[in-house]
Image: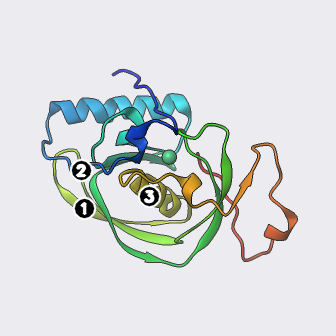
Amino acid sequence: MALRNIFVDGDPILRKICRPVEKFDEKLHILLDDMHETLDKAEGVGLAGPQVGMCRRLFIMHIDDERIEAINPEIIKTSGKQYVIEGCLSCPDKWGYVTRPQKVTLKAQDRNGQWFEKEFEELGAQCVCHENAHLDGQLFVDIVEEFVRPDEQPPKRKKAKSVKVRSIK
Ligand code: NI
C-alpha cells in the first residue's frame, strides 16, 4: 500500500464530473487500499476518488470502525434533516454548518462489482452525501450556511435542542 496525495480546493480535478468505474480489477483494489491508508493517515472520515487525483465514481468511508467502499454510488432515498458542522480534507482549515439529510439509502457496487444497498444515519448519512457530491465536482464549501473557525464554539443560537451539531472531516 502507498499513501496518495490529497488534492486541495483550487485544483480543477475537484470540480470535474467523475466517470463511472468499469473495471473491477487489481488496479482498482490497489487504489482503494491506498485510499484507506491515506484516510487513516489523514484521520478523516471519508475520501473520494477525485481527492486523490482519480476522476472516477468511488469513495470510501471510515465510520464506527467500519470501512465502507462505494463504487458507482447512488443515493436512492433520503429523509429528515440535520444541521451539522462539516470539513473536508481537500479544504484545509475550513469548517462550516451545512444541512444534510438525517438518513440516506446508498446503492453502490463493492470492489468486486457486486451491487449492495445500505442505510446510513447521522454521521454516516452526512458523510455519504459529502463524498457523493465530490463525484459531481461539488465541495461542502459550496453549500456552507455559516463558516466557523476550528477553535470556535458553535454559535449559541445554534444550540437549540432540535439542532444536532457534529463535526466531520
Ligand atoms: Ni471532502
**Three-letter amino acid code of the residue under disc 2:** Asp
**Three-letter amino acid code of the residue under disc 3:** Val
Which residue lies at the image location 60% right of the left edge and 50% below the top edge?
A: 168
Which residue lies at the image location 79% right of the left edge and 68% below the top edge?
A: 158
Tell me where residue 160 appears, x and y as whole percent: 80, 74
Give whichever of discs 3 and 1 has the lower sequence position.
1
The CA span between labels 2 and 3 is 15 Å
Q: Which residue is mark 2?
A: 110
Which residue occupies the extreme right position in the image?
156
State whether residue 151 is above or below residue 99.
Answer: above
State whether residue 87 is above or below residue 123.
Answer: above
Q: Which residue is mark 3?
A: 128
Tell me where residue 55 appears, x and y as whole percent: 30, 41
Q: Which residue is mark 1?
A: 116
Please rate how many residues cluster around mark 2, counting C-alpha atoms within 10 Å: few if below 14, some from 14 to 19, many from 20: some
State whether residue 156 is above or below residue 11.
Answer: below
Which residue lies at the image location 13% right of the left edge and 46% below the top edge?
A: 22
**Seen in the image, is 139 located left or right of residue 141?**
left
Contact? badges 2 and 3 (CB < 8 Å): no
Ligand 1 closer than 8 Å to label 2 CB: no
Which residue lies at the image location 17% right of the left edge and 46% below the top edge?
A: 112
Tell me where residue 144 appears, x and y as whole percent: 63, 59
Circle 3: element type: helix
Contact? badges 2 and 1 (CB < 8 Å): yes
Q: On the rendered image, what quadrant is the N terminus found in?
A: top left
